[in-house]
Image: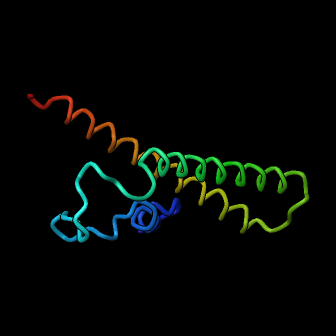
Amino acid sequence: MADPLGFINAANRDTGLTGLRAGGARDHGEFAGQASGASFKDVLKAGVEEVNRAQQEATRAVEDLATGRRGDIESVVVATQKADNAFRMLQQLRNRMVEAYDEIKQMRV
C-alpha cells in the first residue's frame, strides 16, 4: 500500500510508538497518561500541510504545462497522482476518525 503522506512510518517514528509491543503494552513502563513524542494534533496538522503542499505542486505543474514553461507531461501526471492519493488518504483518515468518534459517542457511561 502506498503511503503518500508518510503516516505509516512517520507515526512510529514521531509519536514514540516504536516502544509498543504486540499487545499494546509499552516496553519502557510509561503510564498511559504520559505520552512521548509528537501529539496527535501535530501529526495530523503536518499531514494536512503535506497534502496542501502536494496540491499546490500539482496545480503549479499543470499551470506550467499549460503556459509552456514545462514540457514533460510525465512529471505533471505524477504530481497530480501524488496529490490525488494524498488527498484520498487524508479523506479516509478523516472518515475513520469520524467513525471512531461516533462509536465513542454511543458508549454508555
Left or right of residue 63: residue 59: left
Q: How many marks?
A: 0
Q: Nearer the viewer, residue 84 or 29?
A: 29
The residue closer to the viewer here, 26 or 67, is 26
Horizontal arrangement in the rendering, residue 75 relative to residue 94 (left or right): right
Q: Quadrant of residue 78?
A: bottom right
The residue at the point 26 percent across, 68 percent down is: 20
Tell me the residue at 90%/51% (across/down): 67
Taking depth in this image into account, of 1 and 37 the one nearest to the observer is 37
> At which x and y percent is residue 106?
15, 29
Q: Where in the figure is residue 87, as x and y percent of width and height?
A: 53, 49
Residue 22 screen position, x and y as percent: 19, 70
Q: Is residue 18 above or below residue 46?
A: below
Where is residue 18, by image quadrant? bottom left
Which residue is at the far right?
Answer: 68
Q: Is residue 45 left or right of residue 36?
A: right
Q: Which residue: 60% across, 48% down?
A: 49
Q: Position of residue 16 (x, y in %)?
A: 38, 64
Specify how the rendered protein is coloured. Answer: rainbow
In the displayed structure, 76 sits above or below 102; it is below
Camera-side residue: 88 or 48? 48
Q: Is residue 82 left or right of residue 1?
A: right
Residue lying at 73% horizontally and 67% vertically, measured from the top left: 75
